[in-house]
Image (cartoon, rainbow, N blue to C red):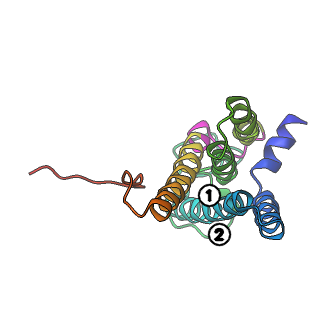
């Protein structure tokens, strides 16, 4: 049951349901917080999905159910699902969803509650032999980072608009510095 809950938490339709539900509820009841959460869930899912698909097709890592060799790569292989292991899309989406929800509450118990199904998703992907451990770790990092980027920038923009002064700089998604 826990493995199945984890799988469902990382499915794309879960994002559609929760994003749409929060957003529509926010508009219908004029609840700006729910509207913002719904928008952040959707935005985070789109960015996470695009990054994940790009990496999957670029690396073309073979799934563990197909091969015992974790170093079997077939870059730019568009044949089937067997070469789309790196990174775990379910785990990336699950951590993205959990991060958006956790970043919109100050209650530490709720934060733990929100991240529990994300870890169950990561476990389920390995348990069901769909991904290697490194696939789910990278997926978790991508989902968490993307959602943190989205929620931080929304907080920055809200603060900037409400005070008419520039607060702290928002978190950069990727920052490269070359010392001279």
Q: Residues within 10 Å of mark 2 (few under 14, many from 20)?
A: few
Viewer-proximal residue, 164 or 92?
164
Q: Residue at x 82, y 50 (%)?
A: 8
Quadrant of the rendered image containing residue 49: bottom right
Q: Say the numbered circle drawn on residue 178.
A: none
Q: Callout 2: helix, strand or loop?
A: loop
The extreme left residue here reads 180
Q: Position of residue 97 (x, y in %)?
A: 68, 51
Quadrant of the rendered image containing residue 37: bottom right
Q: Is residue 160 magenta?
A: no
User: Compared to 20, does 11 lie above or below?
Assistant: above
Residue 160 seen from this side: yes
Q: CA distance from mark 1 to mark 2?
A: 8 Å
Q: Which residues are magenta?
A: 128-136
Viewer-proximal residue, 6 or 113?
113
Q: Which residue is mark 1?
A: 83
Image side of residue 160 versus residue 146, left or right: left
Image side of residue 155 versus residue 21, left or right: left
Badges 1 and 2: C-beta atoms under 8 Å apart? yes
Q: Residue at x 77, y 55 (%)?
A: 11
Q: Position of residue 99 (x, y in %)?
A: 63, 45
The extreme top residue here reads 109
Viewer-proximal residue, 157 or 103?
157
The extreme front residue here reads 163
Q: Position of residue 98 (x, y in %)?
A: 68, 45
Quadrant of the rendered image containing residue 118: top right
Q: Residues within 10 Å of mark 1 (few under 14, many from 20)?
A: many
Location of the N terminus (image quadrant): top right
Q: Residue at x 68, y 66 (%)?
A: 80
Q: Which residue is mark 2?
A: 79
Q: Is residue 131 magenta?
A: yes
User: Compared to 43, does 156 lie above or below?
Assistant: above
């Amino acid at each position: 049951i826990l493995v199945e809950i984890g799988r469902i938490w990382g499915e794309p339709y879960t994002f559609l349901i929760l994003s749409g539900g929060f957003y529509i509820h926010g508009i219908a009841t004029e609840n700006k917080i729910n509207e913002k959460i719904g928008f952040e869930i959707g935005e985070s899912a789109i960015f996470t999905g695009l990054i994940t698909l790009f990496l999957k097709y670029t690396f073309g890592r073979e799934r563990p159910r197909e091969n015992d060799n974790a170093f079997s790569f077939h870059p730019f292989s568009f044949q089937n699902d067997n070469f789309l292991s790196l990174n775990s899309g379910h785990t990336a989406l699950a951590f993205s969803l959990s991060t958006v929800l956790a970043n919109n509450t100050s209650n530490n118990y709720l934060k733990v509650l929100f991240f529990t199904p994300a870890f169950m998703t990561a476990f389920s992907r390995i348990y069901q032999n769909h991904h290697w451990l490194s696939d789910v770790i990278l997926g978790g990092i991508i989902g968490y980072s993307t959602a943190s980027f989205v929620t931080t920038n929304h907080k920055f923009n809200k603060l900037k608009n409400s005070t008419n002064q520039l607060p702290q700089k928002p978190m950069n998604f990727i920052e490269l510095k070359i010392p001279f």
